[in-house]
Amino acid sequence: MVTNDSRRNSGLQWSDRFSVGIPEIDKQHKMLFELIDKLHAAIFQHKGTSACAEVLDELIEYTRIHFSLEQRLMHMGKYPGYEAHCALHRELVQDVESLVEKIHSGRTAISFELLHFLRTWLTKHILGEDKKYGEFFAVGGHGSFDSFEQESDAALREHKKKWWKFW
């Protein structure tokens, strides 16, 4: 994780208010916070387009895996908001893919506006939509998520080689 000595605070810090009550999902959300913080540091330190794009690509790859695993959990647990939640994920992925295509073609730059968009989307999504399924699972007494955690751990270990198998 990037230290505060090397950049201004990104304004996005994990706290318990973001917890959905599912340890594996919370761990993945923390990683998304760290990746956005890493992108912020790269931009703030003027690392250049290629360095910033590399971090953005890492963030996108991890987000795809996280969405896939989150959707797997909702499907396994028969979450009633599954379809609507998946639609929100698809919409973000399409928006970001379009933006990344513009970045790679040189039609736009990675900027603090992009960071603001990503921070806002992530925090609103967790505090709104993700909290809903967290409450659903808590009220439903689903208890242990051991099999999901094992599946997630295996997927995340392999994500650099095989992320497309989960999306």
Image (cartoon, helix red, strand yellow):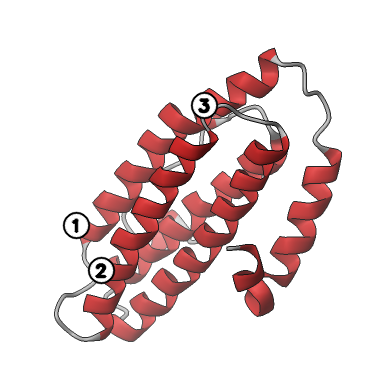
Residue 99 circle label? 2
Label 2 neighbourhood size at 10 Å, few (<14), some (14-19), many (20+)? Answer: some
Whether the residues at callouts 3 and 1 have beta carbons within 8 Å, the answer is no
| Amino acid carrying mark 3 in the image | Lys
Whether the residues at callouts 2 and 1 have beta carbons within 8 Å, the answer is no
Question: Badge 3 is on which residue?
Answer: 131
Q: Residue furthest left?
A: 107
Whether the residues at callouts 3 and 2 have beta carbons within 8 Å, the answer is no
For the residues labelled 2 and 1, the Cα–Cα distance comes to 12 Å
| Residue 155 x, y percent position in the rendering | 73, 62
Residue at 21%, 66% in the rendered image: 111
Quadrant housing residue 101: bottom left
Q: Quadrant of the N terminus?
A: bottom right
Residue at 64%, 76% in the rendered image: 160
| Residue 22 x, y percent position in the rendering | 68, 32
Label 1 neighbourhood size at 10 Å, few (<14), some (14-19), many (20+)? Answer: few
